[in-house]
Amino acid sequence: MRTEAGVAAAAGQESERLSLSALAASGAGSAAGPAVEPRSLRIGMVHLGLGAFHRAHQAVYTEDAAAASGDAGWGILGVTGRTAKVADALQPQDGLYTVLTKAAGSREEDSSARIIGSLRGVAFPGRDTPRVIQALAARETTVVTMTITEKGYPRDASGHLALDSPAVAADLAVLERDSRRPANSDDAARTPLGLLARGLFARYRSSGAPLNVISCDNLSANGSVTRTLLTEMAAAGGSGFRDWVCESVSFPDTMVDRIVPAATEADRREAQTLLGLRDEGLVVAEPFGQWILSDDFAARRPAWELAGAVVTRDVRPFEAAKLRLLNGTHSLLAYLGALRGYRTIAEAAADEELAAAAAALQAEVLPTLSPPPGVDLAEYAAGILARFRNPALGHTTLQVAMDGSQKLPVRALGAVEDLLARGVVPEALARLVAGWMVFVYRGRDAFGNELPLQDPLAEVLAGKARGPQGGLVDRMFELPGVFSAPVAGNPGFRTAVAAHAAELLGSLSQSP
């Protein structure tokens, strides 16, 4: 049932902005939540990377866990990345925001709105580094989660800390200085892991209490990757600090899954109608959600399993299935779909030829996977394609196509290497790689519309792509940070990629 405020919003009138006081005064319309009283929560968790995915995933699981367990110690301090935009949007709302869940339909009842109240503070490192360090050092904080994307982990080609990165060097210099004298915490951190390392150093110097650091990014063995990089960073703070990180900080591997497209103005209007209040922090998500965590914790944590998460001895089978079946398919539809002029993943997945290519990729990688406990991989794969066809989500091909140089190694090239080791040249995966190369090379779709290249290696990629069309594949295979020697040096795979690239380029040249 709609409130008067909801009717006013539907009629186009300006609504009051979501906040604790507005919620208390007007109610939440037809929206649910929060599941806990926000004012009752104490901050016990810091999250780095306060984007839409965290707000639709870990923050929801954490609120549900707090509600199910009655534990009020799981308020979250959310820390943004490169800009203050999200913090500035959520601060006036007292950290409240709405998750608009959209099923595969166009009817009003196919959408539902829920207000989340687990976010109890927001910060931007550019101006709030001291506050974040203080929260990381607090004994009451026992969990740090991260969604900083693949490019937030500064690694060199060997998987170790990228010491040649100016941002990493700046953070290490501050950490080294702080190890020799009282910290000057006014220095803004340059990288998320640098910020975390400085917070851990402050914790080491104060209470020395144990901590769980939980990466929720799409990286194979994401906990192990984080452990390696932070331990190498910790060396700048001295051997005692490095040893403490090794002994007192846990880095469980995880796997996360939920499609969270960018919110549109239409989504904001729909949420305002349901809520009766204006929400500048709205996130949109599909109904599906999954969180798998390895049972490796050094300190107390929310009872996430009460909220539907799975805590298991071994995350690797779940992780591999998600990266190769879901993320790999996502990337294929993104590159091939964008080149054909499709704006959304749903449009690309509805194309029979692209859907067949996606299914072929899944069939190709299935033999490289070990079934996770209780999971039928064939059903899981079919469910992925059904999720991608959900037109209500509007997940754009360009959004998924971002950062391909970081995504392809974990989403596709590991499976390529496994199959080549078995003597199999994977044609569907070769088509995906060719699609990425052609996407980089052309920069335009079949109708001449620009396809902007958003990638941390954008300048390097543009340089490799520049040149005769016939040498494109050979030039791209020279990227050592993307292609391993077994993949780049396999003549059969190079031939397959070249054939698919030539076919794609030929078909695109004939487009209007």
Image (cartoon, helix red, strand yellow):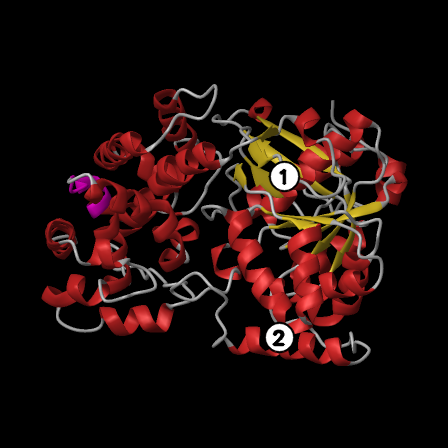
- The answer to whether 59 appears left or right of 152 in the picture is right
Tag 2 near tag 1, CB within 8 Å: no
- Report the residue at 38% width, 20% height from top: 379
Picture quarter with the C terminus: bottom left
Q: In this view, does 24 lie above or below 189?
A: above
Q: Is mark 2 on a helix, strand or loop?
A: helix
Closer to the camera in the image, 500 or 192: 192
Q: Residue at (37%, 29%) from the top-left corner? A: 370
Q: Find residue 124 and name its label.
A: none
Residue type pointed to by label 2: Leu
User: Can you tell which quarter of the image residue 360 is in?
Assistant: top left
Q: Mark 2 points at which residue?
A: 172
Q: In the picture, which quadrant includes the N terminus?
A: top right
Residue range in magenta is 424-430
Residue depth check, mark 2 versus mark 1: number of the one nearer the observer: 1
Position of 334 relative to 34 (above/below): below
In the image, residue 159 lies at what x, y percent?
43, 60
Which residue bears the numbered disc 1? 296
Q: Helix, strand, or loop for circle 1?
A: loop
The 10 Å Cα crowd at callout 2, few under 14, some 14 to 19, many 20 or more, is: many
Q: How far apart are marks 2 and 1 (CA)?
A: 28 Å
